[in-house]
Amino acid sequence: MKFETDYIEKLAKVLAETGLTEISLEDGEQAITLRKEVVVSSAPQVVAAPVQAAAPVAAATPVASAPAADVAPAKKGTPITSPMVGTFYKAPSPDSEPFVSVGSTVSSGDVVCIVEAMKMMNEIESEVSGKVVEICVEDGQPVEFGQVLMYVE
């Protein structure tokens, strides 16, 4: 059995939608483990499921509506998300310049980063044109399926 990318993405979705924190599979010489970070903090995290992150914000808005408007982040633009579980790389090799940095202008179809999954380097392309306003992931950091990698405005 070969672990296909679609199968891995389905496993990542199951992990994200359930209370599970880890899934491990072995088949002969192949093995795969998917882990979800468990955050024990009140600060919002990028890895939190959108439903979980939205509930505290909705509850906090009626209690302190004026301060919430002051604290709300400026428009971030369109998110570019990871299409798979893997490792984020900002450049094609350690000694190369990053594909993009904050302030870079990108066009639809431009490669903005790489996500390595099962020793395959997957180039991630921008689906929108604009300026990179935030990069949400550090080089070499593990990323989840659907995790925001950067915002383009």
Image (cartoon, rainbow, N blue to C red):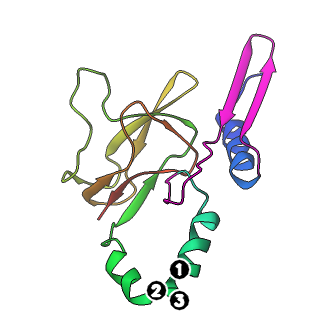
- The residue at 53%/89% (across/down) is 62
Label 1: which secondary element: helix
Tell me, for residue 147, which label it has, or none: none
**Quarter of the rendering containing residue 26:** top right
Name the amino acid type tagged 1. Ala
Spot occupied by residue 33 in the image (x, y as percentages of width and height): 69, 28
> Alpha carbon of mark 3 to alpha carbon of mark 1: how far?
6 Å
Give the residues drawn in magenta, as a range.
19-46
> Is residue 151 rendered to the left or right of residue 2?
left
Front residue of 42/54: it is 42
How many angstroms separate mark 1 from mark 2 (CA)? 6 Å
Looking at the picture, does residue 17 appear above or below residue 57?
above
**43 is within the stretch colored magenta:** yes
What type is the residue that disc 3 sits on? Pro
Given contact means CB atoms under 8 Å apart, are the residues at marks 3 and 1 in contact? Answer: yes
* Residue at x 57%, y 65% (from the top left corner): 53
Classify residue 139 by image quadrant.
top left
Q: As rendered, which of 2 and 148 lies closer to the eye?
A: 148
Crowding near the residue tagged with mark 1, few <14, some 14–19, many ≥20 C-alpha atoms within 10 Å: few
Q: Position of residue 93 (x, y in %)?
A: 31, 22
- The mark found on residue 62 in the picture is 3
For label 2, count other residues whose C-alpha is less than 10 Å away and answer few (under 14), some (14-19) or many (20+): few
Instruction: Tell whether label 2 touches label 1 (CB within 8 Å).
Output: yes
| Mark 3 → mark 2, Cα distance in angstroms | 6 Å
- Return the residue at label 1: 60
The residue type indicated by label 2 comes to Ala
Residue occupied by mark 2? 64
Identity of the residue drawn at 81% across and 12% down: 28
Helix, strand or loop under label 3 = helix
Image quadrant occupied by the C terminus: bottom left
- Magenta stretch: residue 21 in it? yes
